[in-house]
Image (tube, rainbow, N blue to C red):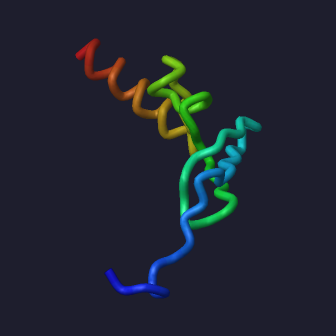
Amino acid sequence: MKTAIHPVYHVDAEVRCLCGNTFTTGSTLTELKTEVCSVCHPFFTGTQRIVDTGGQVERFRRRAEQAKKA
């Protein structure tokens, strides 16, 4: 392995999530910022959030209900 070409590895890099959760991990960066983590991700929390843009979910539900009646 060549010397002086590899980045410095920090064993105490701090990860900050948008939800406010912080934890430490190993990384070549000293600080990491993320949008989701195991505290707020729907897979780990068991909750599902629907981001409805322009009423698409409601339109889909109405069409599905009409198809069920026909």
| Residue 54 makes an appearance in the image | no
Q: Residue furthest top?
A: 69
Q: Nearer the viewer, residue 25 or 37?
A: 25
- Does 56 sit above or below residue 27? above
What is the quadrant of the N terminus in the image? Answer: bottom left
x 43%, y 25%: residue: 62
Give percent across and percent down for residue 21.
Answer: 71, 35
The image quadrant that residue 29 belongs to is bottom right
Q: Nearer the viewer, residue 22 or 69?
A: 22
Q: How many marks?
A: 0
x 65%, y 51%: residue: 12
Give percent across and percent down for residue 9.
Answer: 54, 65
- Does 31 sit above or below residue 67? below
Q: Is residue 29 left or right of residue 22?
A: left
x 36%, y 86%: residue: 2
What is the quadrant of the C terminus in the image? Answer: top left
Q: Nearer the viewer, residue 62 or 3?
A: 3
Give percent across and percent down for residue 68.
Answer: 26, 15
| Residue 39 makes an appearance in the image | yes
The image quadrant that residue 40 belongs to is top right
- Does 61 sit above or below residue 18? above
- Does 52 sit above or below residue 7? above
x 57%, y 47%: residue: 25
Give percent across and percent down for residue 24.
Answer: 64, 44
Q: Is residue 69 left or right of residue 14?
A: left
